[in-house]
Amino acid sequence: MPANNLNLKSAFRRFVDLVKPIDEVYCVTAVEPSRPDFFTYIRQRNDEVVRQIFQAEKAVNKEFPDVLIDYHIIFLEGRPLEDFVTHQPEFTYLKKGLRSKELKRGVEG
């Protein structure tokens, strides 16, 4: 069941609020095909950071049970963010100070 746009946006903002304090998180994007996908981009593989992101996912799922979200964690490993964002995001969080010509629509910093 696709989420309505208001619930999706609220869930996205809550997720961003939870992961924004994590230094390793560069960017979060959301796309909404038949089921919303949230992509979290981090600098490199780090088990502690992944655990923190999983906790944020659980919290959002609990707060928004009507929004069924598929979560994905992308490890940049020194590669440019633009190499990974192949979709047009519905919503985007980009860490302050980062620039991306590909991710201008819907950016919150």
Image (cartoon, helix red, strand yellow):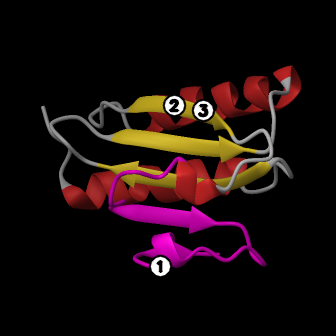
Which region of the structure is painted magenta?
A: 84-109
Classify residue 46 as left or right of residue 8. right
Residue density around tag 2, few if under 14, some if 14–19, many if 20 or more, within 10 Å: some
Marked residue nearer the N-terminal end (3 or 1): 3
Q: Residue at x 25, y 47 (%)?
A: 32
Residue at label 3? Answer: 73
Marked residue nearer the N-terminal end (2 or 1): 2
Say which quadrant the C terminus sits in.
Answer: bottom right
Tell me where residue 50 appears, x and y as whole percent. Answer: 74, 27
Which quadrant holds residue 16? Answer: bottom right
In three-dimensional space, the C-alpha distance between marks 2 and 3, rounded to whole angstroms, equals 4 Å
Classify residue 63 as left or right of residue 27. left
Asked whether 1 or 50 is in front, the reply is 50
Asked whether 3 or 96 is in front, the reply is 96
Say which quadrant the N terminus sits in.
Answer: top left
Q: Residue at x 56, y 75 (%)?
A: 108
Residue at label 2? Answer: 72
Mark 1 is on which residue type?
Answer: Lys
Residue at label 1? Answer: 104
